[in-house]
Amino acid sequence: MSLKVAVLVKQVPDLEALVKVPAEDRLEIEERTACSFYDEVAVEAALALQQAHPQAQLTALSAGGRRALDALRRAMALGIDAVEHLGDDSLEAADSLGVARVLAARLKQFQPHVVLCGKQALDDDQAAVGPMVAELLGIPHVCAVVRLQVDPEAGLAEVGRKVEGEVWTGRTRLPVLLTAEKGLALPHLPVVTRVMKAMRAKIPELSLKDLGLDPAGLRGRVRRLRYRPPPSRPPVTMMTRPFPDNVAELIDRLRRAGAL
């Protein structure tokens, strides 16, 4: 059979973007974004499946506002066959469950054999959307996968995941949702021609109405009460004496500070 693979991607603030907390009710993040790293690992794993099974169909999905289009263009530039944008800016008010419901609604229509996504997004680090999607679809899921082999004819996937320094291997029937851990694949840099093609591509969009969903029912049920910046780091004290004399100096300083 022809293997159908769906990859879930998310656009998140760049790790080097400046974050400010000007007030307890407001958070300011510099407009620098990137596709979440673990989602790029999932994209690379999907491309590896296509190399092993040339007839495999790869589709990337992203739910959210206009920013989600950038993650989809990145997936196209990396080599994904087709992409789809789900929802609109109203999903900015949705929580993880709301986003999972949007993705699951489309995946029920698409019926993929394998769903791949990052083990967690690099903005909220909740690691919630992937398992939620699997539960909504009623299919098995394996988190933090570092090895993957799929046998479409047998309808089986063999997966490995790290547990306390070891890689445990298991088998599961298709369809299955897998969340990618660092080590499953190494994301590559897309070639310029693919990047330019992705920038010009028209991305199909499905509204919440197309998916049979009500935006009011997707709003988050968790309310943020306040934002607080991290505490300022205290000044660093350098030992002035060379080793091993600085050991005695360190002990003396700790005693004076009341730490010993």
Image: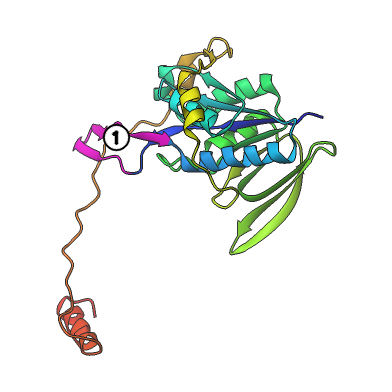
Secondary element at image label 1:
loop
Place of residue 229 in the rendered image (x, y in percent of width and height, measured from the top left) = 23, 45
Instruction: Give, as a single range, the part of the protein colored magenta.
Output: 16-34
Q: Amino acid at mark 1?
A: Leu
Residue in the image at 75% along x and 30% along y = 55
Judge whether 26 appears above or below 105 on screen. Answer: below
Q: Residue furthest right?
A: 154
Nearest to the observer: residue 128 or residue 40: 40
Residue in the image at 44% along x and 43% along y = 125
Name the side, left or right, on which 210 lies relative to 242: right
- For the C terminus, give its image quadrant: bottom left
Give the residue at mark 1. Answer: 225
Nearest to the observer: residue 231 or residue 29: 29
The stretch drawn in magenta includes residue 27? yes
The stretch drawn in magenta includes residue 54? no
Place of residue 170 in the rendered image (x, y in percent of width and height, measured from the top left) = 74, 52
Nearest to the observer: residue 250 or residue 61: 61
Judge whether 228 appears above or below 237 on screen. Answer: above
Name the side, left or right, on which 124 lies relative to 252: right
Q: Residue furthest top?
A: 209
